Amino acid sequence: MHDPIAARANAIHDALIAMEREASAEDLFPLGYLIPQVPLVVDQLDYSPEEVEGEEFDSVFHEWLNNTFAQDGMSDADQAAVRQLFNQACERANQI
């Protein structure tokens, strides 16, 4: 059975890994923060693959980020960098 959430998360994760290979030094921290979070979020989701769209992962992940930012006490600048790179990874995943 096709799992749209897992497929979307894998595409985003692959995009993040590719971005890390070409990243500037300033992007390494936010990418290092994001990359392990993607499979972690997928593992914690409870859903029926036949009842979801892959793009729903994006909004779930943004919600996850809001919660983890609050717990981690991350600076506004780091939060913005993480969000920007996640959005770029989503765009790359759309092109696959």
Image (cartoon, helix red, strand yellow):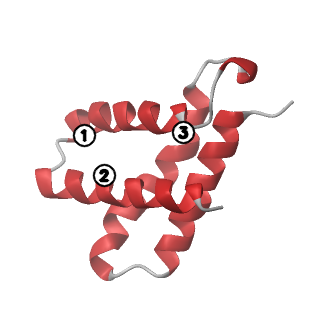
Are there few (<14), some (14-19), or many (20+) residues within 10 Å of tag 1? some
Report the residue marked by disc 2.
83
For marks 3 and 2 on the same chain, the one whose residue lies earlier in the sequence: 3
For marks 3 and 1 on the same chain, the one whose residue lies earlier in the sequence: 3
Give me the C-alpha separation between circle 3 and circle 2: 17 Å
Report the residue marked by disc 3.
40
Can you say which quadrant of the picture contains the C terminus?
bottom right
Report the residue marked by disc 1.
69
Residue 56 left/right relative to 85: right
**Picture coordinates of residue 6 (x, y %)?**
68, 39
Give me the C-alpha separation between circle 3 and circle 1: 15 Å
Residue 24 left/right relative to 51: left
Quarter location, residue 59: top left
**Picture coordinates of residue 7 (x, y %)?**
69, 44
Residue farthest left in this picture = 76
Can you tell which of label 3 and label 2 is closer to the viewer?
2
Residue that appears at 64% across and 23% down: 52
Residue that appears at 62% across and 36% down: 54
